[in-house]
Amino acid sequence: QVQLVESGGGLVQAGGSLRLSCAASGGIFSTDAMGWYRQAPGKQRELVASFTNSGMTNYADTVKGRFTISRDIAKNTMVLQMNTLKPEDTAVYYCNARVLRSGLNNYYWGQGTQVTVSS
């Protein structure tokens, strides 16, 4: 069974930092597009940062210069380093990635990790 598990969320004061990790089990990370999303209460899920199929990185305008996405395909992990956090960054953060298992290459979501930034 394929699982994506996020970790690293928590409560932090504005201006602080958090490092989110996404680990895949039961399969192998594909080098296809993958990324981090977030969903705040009452809002739609939005893309925060991602890798394109060619390995380029994209960031939402609201996090550019503050967040950094990275990955280690060999270790089946993806990381989101979040610096200079703001209260508006408060949300549940999800990772999304394609995982290869038994000849199938499907996208999966993690269960989410809560990030709360206090003012």
Image: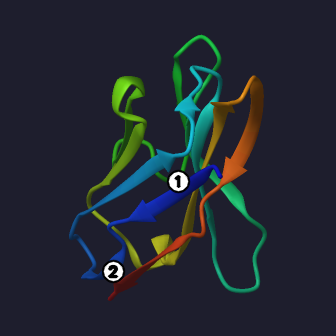
Q: Check disc 2 and report its element: helix, strand or loop.
A: strand
Badge 2 amino acid: Gly
Give me the residue at 38% from left, 66% from top: 7
Q: Which is more toward the observer, 89 or 78?
A: 78
Left or right, 25 with respect to 40, comes to left
Q: Check disc 1 and report its element: helix, strand or loop.
A: loop
Callout 1 environment at 10 Å: few (<14), some (14 to 19), or many (20+)?
A: few
Measuring from the top left, give residue 20's x and y in whole percent. 36, 58
Looking at the rendered image, the disc whose residue lies closer to the viewer, 1 or 2, is 2
Give residue 116's quadrant in the image.
Answer: bottom left
Measuring from the top left, give residue 105's x and y in whole percent. 75, 28
Looking at the image, residue 89 lies above or below residue 62: below
Residue farthest along the left direction in this orientation: 16
Q: How many marks?
A: 2
- Check contact, mark 1 vs mark 2: CB within 8 A: no
Measuring from the top left, give residue 37's x and y in whole percent. 61, 55
Give residue 70's quadrant in the image.
Answer: top left
**What residue is pinned by disc 2?**
10
Give me the residue at 59% from left, 55% from top: 3
The label number, if any, that marks residue 75 in the structure image: none
Looking at the image, residue 17 lies above or below residue 92: above
Is residue 23 visible to the viewer in this orientation of the structure? yes
Give me the residue at 55% from left, 45% from top: 26
Give me the residue at 52% from left, 18% from top: 56
Q: Which is more toward the observer, 85 or 27?
A: 27
**What residue is pinned by disc 1?**
62
Q: Which is more toward the observer, 22 or 115?
A: 22
Badge 1 amino acid: Thr
Give residue 34's quadrant in the image.
Answer: top right
Q: CA distance from mark 1 to mark 2?
A: 20 Å
